[in-house]
Image: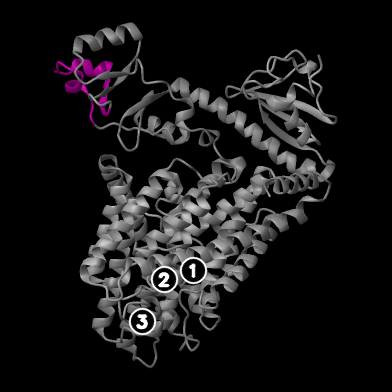
Amino acid sequence: MGEQLGELLAALRRRLHRPGAMEPVMLGLGAATGFGTGVVVWLLISGIELVQRVAWSPDVPAWQIVVVPTMGGLLVGLLVWKVVPESSGGGVVPTMESLAIRGGQLSRRIPLAGTAATSLALGTGASGGREGPIVLIGGAIGSAVGRGVRLDDDRMRSLVAAGAAAGIGATFNAPIGGMLFAIELLLGGIRRAGSLQVVVVASVVSAVTARQLVGESLPLFQASSGLGLGAPAELLLYAGLGLAAVVVAFGFRRGEDVARRRFARVRSRIGVPFTVALGGLGVGLVALVFPEVLGEGSHLPGIDGFREPIQAMLDGGFGTSWTAAGLLLALAGAKLLATLFAVGSGSAVGTFAPTLFTGAALGAAFGIVAAQFLGADLVQSGAFALVGMAAVYAATARAPLTAILIVFELTGSYDLVLPLMLAVGIAMFVTELLGWDSLYLHQLRQRGVVYGQIDELDVLQTVTVGEVMSAPEGHVVPATTSADALRAHFASSGSHGVSVVDERGRLVGVVSRSDLARPGTTAQDLATRKVLTVTAQDPVFRAVRRMASLDVGRLPVVDPLTREVVGVLRRGDVVRAYQRGIARSLGAQQRAASGRLRDLAGVGFVEVVLQPGSALTGRAVREVAWPERSVLTSVRRNGEVVVPTGDTLLQDGDELVVLTGRSDELRELAAPEQAQSRGVSE
């Protein structure tokens, strides 16, 4: 079976090299991505239901509301810690980060491990949604398909976006909404017709596949067909609802910032699994008062009366009194708080569904209050709940078309088109005045990633601190080091600062030459305690911004969990990072050109890394019998680009970039086990 699959992939790769063959094949790859994502959505929904049946008793006692989310958080934390860290805190931001700086490359572990983590999280009551994780899972499926046929970066991004669209389209049974989600948030607009076609095909195929496997009950909620706009004067109320939606969006934006920082400090002390469990405990405590906050806000077994809170909001099931309005507002706040516990602690859930939940609660409360003044017969609270869902999501994600179209597809009615457009438009206008990015772009900026087209990216975003940092030796001193010893160290090394660590190697602070003038006898006494740091996984772009903010020439590199110093980033390291980023940028440009060359002439750029023991190692370029129609264009060595000549000697670890129409022959030539018998002239 494996050999047959390998032969099929090899044949497909050869087919891709023929002129004009790429676009039809891309549609087929989009359909394959959509089918795979639709199947995984079914597995995810089935997994959530299975976990619910196992974790919850028929009649849920109070203790279980607290214990089940806590234990579920512990299990999810173990998966996030050891297997699938990308699923922590949702999946949209990691997907966007992959598109921005890694050409859409996502781990093959994500589809199965991410499905297991999210099934455990939502099945045990973590407050969140499956839509964010399914974006990551669908994107990973698209990435796996693209790697299987060795797509260039541009087409790989299209396929990852198609997988994300397929995930949204399948989980909501809303293929148009999924398509617009990918275009607005992941692709930043329609860049080329090929991307749009692949995204559309994947979203439709995924929605149809999931519908056949799950059934017509797939949508989380449905609005009554009788909801619509009453008197035209109601539009003023909907405009007010758009303003109120911005307040809730601010709660998500600011709340997630605070929650992530607080839980990051907790994580450094107790580790990932116990941190996620602590978040589950917080969700359980909130759920003791408001059980509706558990999970996605629907289909929680054993809690009578609270299984469909969103549906009850759309149907007006909470009543029409002032008390009902107060209860709905309290429920919106409780859902926000519970979501911050789950997402901030790193559980494998997203914020898509919670924004819809809080939007529905806000809208229903707004409608009830309006009805108290204007009359219950004139105002439908369910209509306001529906519009509130779209307005809050649009203000949070800054994706207006996605918000409107998903609501349309959920209801199947266009009766509320004017209120929806007005409320969403007002919310977008206010957030634009406030200068807000979307919640996802905001989190990316905090990671040091500025999202944009590939040509707009700073090359330092493509290089991590760990790739260029210096070893800690010579830049770290124990906390007990005397002031005299520090003076001697600075004099002998020429250094201007060192990191101070305790007996376990954890960062205590930093000492500079100027600090020696302060009173103190040891490095610990002289150290500045509040220090900006980076981790090995951070992009160098983020580190440079931190260095510039304090006008310093070095930053300690620490382990995010233990605070142990693992290196130091200096100005010289930044220069090396820039050189490496330039080399990668050239590689990205070559791969982009490769797609155009394949379409025109059937040739493209192929990258081959020389592993130790390769027969090409130590050979001059002129001595190698390269495949016909092949040209060695560049050699990337130690982060630098070498323009090859006939006398250039090839070395272990060299990344050869070859323009060729025979990639299979080139890879066979570079393979150590076969290179001795072919391809090298003696």
Direction from residue 319 to residue 573 in the image, left or right: right
Q: Amino acid at mark 2?
A: Gly
386 displayed left or right of 287? right
Q: CA distance from mark 3 to mark 1?
A: 19 Å
Total residue callouts:
3
- In space, the residues marked 2 and 1 are separated at their CA atoms by 8 Å
Element under disc 3: helix
Q: Is residue 521 magenta?
A: yes
- The amino acid on which the numbered mark 3 sits, given as a three-letter code, is Gly
Q: Which mark is residue 367?
A: 3
Q: Is residue 509 magenta?
A: yes
In which quadrant of the rendered view does residue 385 lie? Answer: bottom left
Reading the image, the residue beneath label 2 is: 242
Query: Is the Cβ of the residue at disc 2 closer than 8 Å to that at disc 1?
Result: yes
Q: Is residue 563 visible?
A: yes
The three-letter amino acid code for the residue at tag 1 is: Gly
Q: Which residue is mark 1?
A: 425
Q: Position of residue 453 (x, y in %)?
A: 60, 46
| 659 versus 316 height, above or below | above
